[in-house]
Image (cartoon, helix red, strand yellow):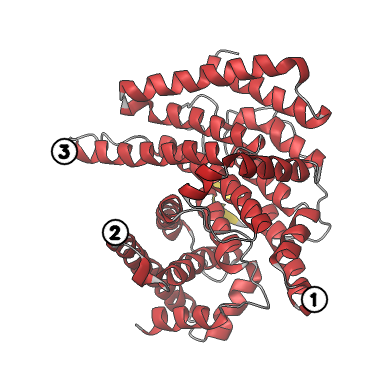
Amino acid sequence: MNDPHALRLTLLIAALHFEWTTGSMQSFESTFLFHKVKLIHMVNKWITERQPERTTCIISQIASLCFIELCLGHVFSAKAHLGGMLNLLKERKRHWQRLPEQDEPLYESSEEEEFNHRYYLLLHSLFTRSMSRLLNSMCCGELSQTYHAVHSEELLALASRLDHVEKNCDLLLKLDALCLMPFLSPSLQTGTISPWIDGTDTVRDLRDLTDSLDMIRSKRSFSASENEFASACANGVASKLHVQYVASHIASISSCKDVPKVRRQMSTEAVKVLKSTWCGLYSATSLYLHYVLGLRTCSEKTLDDYVFYILRDALICCFAKVKDCMGADGCLLFWQIFLGAISVEIRLQPSASMGSESHTLDSDMSEFFHKGIRRWSQACHIRQWADARATLQKITWPIIYADEHIAKAVWERAHFS
């Protein structure tokens, strides 16, 4: 192996795999901690050197640290790493914006941008899921810094217990995903990554989850959020989605050969290929799980804001590629656009409590997504909300949706404005 950083990540992942399989790292714990500390020191050294051209490499290593902390149930350490990733992404944008105009663009390559966005979406998804489990178990809506400072040991113990329960839920799938993680950050080579993937398996998993929740929510005795979360875990949906995040990323990299195949039971029904950008599909998936299915608690607006930026950039790419608006790819594109629009609308509901910067972001994003809906509507000659909803259901959409009135209002405002 020519990449020492990839070797260190592989060793850390191997130790986690051993701990998940046996229940303890045993004699490997000191080796695990040694390499973890070395990785932290290396990242800190790179950050202090302030070399923007190394941002992608630094982000990949921070992503590794964040993933490791989440695997250990250390959600607050993971949050610090995720915040560090976000600060680097923002600093990188500011740096390139300050550079003078040149004949040749000095902005980082699209491949590096793609990798950065994927790292962030993957870890944001895992972090949000972990925080949601923690908050649901405590039956509270948020954790303040003060509460964390006073009850840090109790919170860590609870998070560790929850992590122990979840990692034993569909363990084979989780071990499969863990084995794939070292492939997440191969050395970048020109032309090795494609932003386009087949989203069929991910959409199928989301449909299964949506159908399960529709069944649960149709029974009054099973309306508690804890039951919904338990059902999602029992069905292995969380694990399946994580596997799809990683496996589809690897499949889009032409330099990744002989990658282990993921064990999963394939459906016998014929399913059309659903072509999408990786970032578009998984940023929309994150919004769907939170704002539509209500399975995830919003982590923090500052962390969530970047998901909207990534979705916007991915949709701009999709607009130029998708030709048949009523085909499978066109329906998936509309699903992504509409998820962006309704998520922003729901965020705007308590607008009085938001800062001016957040309100401006949501307003700008709202205008972008509304234009996207209007563009798709005109191309497909669809004007009624019932027809638009039927299109969403071709991808996945709940029969029972608490914010149905908001969804209809978003469609009508975007279509008739």
> Seen in the image, is 297 located left or right of residue 26?
left
Q: Which mark is residue 357?
A: 2
**Residue highlighted by disc 3:** 101
Give the structural element (helix, strand or loop) at label 2: helix
Percent of width and height locating residue 143: 53, 53
Sequence-first tag of 3 and 2: 3
Number of residues whose C-alpha sits closer than 10 Å to that of mark 3, classed few (under 14), some (14–19) or many (20 or more): few
Tell me residue 342's x, y (percent).
Answer: 48, 71
Q: Secondary structure at mark 3?
A: loop
**Front label number (1 vs 3):** 1
Name the amino acid, label 3: Glu
Q: Residue at x 62, y 77 (%)?
A: 401
> Label 1, label 2: how many angstroms apart (C-alpha)?
42 Å
Q: Secondary structure at mark 1?
A: helix
Q: Is residue 215 or residue 176 the one in the foreground?
A: 215
Q: Is residue 273 visible?
A: no
- Label 3 vs label 2, nearer the camera: 2
> Which class describes the residues within 10 Å of circle 1: few (<14), some (14-19), or many (20+)?
few
Q: Residue furthest front?
A: 150
The residue indicated by pointer 1 is 221
Q: Is residue 105 left or right of residue 227?
A: left
Query: Where is residue 355 drawn, in percent x and y?
Result: 31, 62
Q: CA distance from mark 1 to mark 3?
A: 63 Å
Name the residue nearer the viewer: 320 or 69: 69
- x and y, in percent, of residue 15 in the image: 71, 23
What's under tag 1, amino acid-wise? Ser
